Image (cartoon, rainbow, N blue to C red):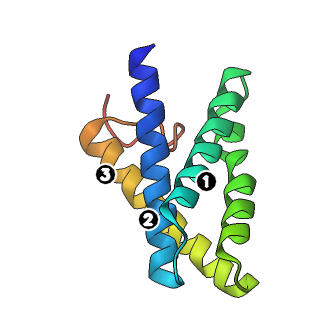
Amino acid sequence: MMKYAVDFMLAIILTAISYDLGSILISDGIAFWQAILIGFSVVSLGAITEAVGAPIWLIVLVPFPIGMILLFYFLDDSVGQWFLTYLTTLVIYTVIHMVMSYFFYFHSLIPAWKLSKK
């Protein structure tokens, strides 16, 4: 149970970092507490989806809308700016996942996409 809690918190922090960096690179940025709130919402929704026994593709897909909606709300910018920020966030998120999965065998960011051999 403790490992799950640590993995859960790490997933929230890494997800928040991707949203924070994406928003800083493309726009004026969002506050870090907003990035943490998005990370918490996205990771929690993914965990709940997993807990109810949903298939892995649904576990990956379900959190996307909440992240998109919260980013749009917090950015308070045009749809074009939001979309570019979201795409940038996804690229950063994917790179973080690749590093964490390959070097640290951590798969909580994208559970279906395991890059490591463990």
Relative to the observer, which residue lies in front, 60 or 27? 27
Give the amino acid at mark 1: Ile
Q: Is 80 rendered above or below residue 89?
A: below
Mark 1 near mark 2, Cβ–Cβ under 8 Å? Answer: no
Identify the residue at horizontal 73%, vertical 68% (top origin): 73
Across and down, in percent, residue 15 comes to: 49, 52
Q: Is 63 rendered above or below residue 53?
A: below
Q: CA distance from mark 2 to mark 3?
A: 11 Å
Question: Disc 2 on helix, strand or loop?
Answer: helix
Across and down, in percent, residue 14 comes to: 42, 50
Give the residue number, with chain letter if any, for mark 2: 92
Left or right: 10 with respect to 53? left
Relative to the observer, which residue lies in front, 45 or 37? 37
Question: Disc 1 on helix, strand or loop?
Answer: helix
Mark 2 near mark 3, Cβ–Cβ under 8 Å? Answer: no
Left or right: 5 with respect to 118? right
Identify the residue at horizontal 54%, vertical 38% (top origin): 112
Give the residue number, with chain letter if any, for mark 3: 99
Question: Disc 3 on helix, strand or loop?
Answer: helix
Residue density around tag 1, few if under 14, some if 14–19, many if 20 or more, within 10 Å: many
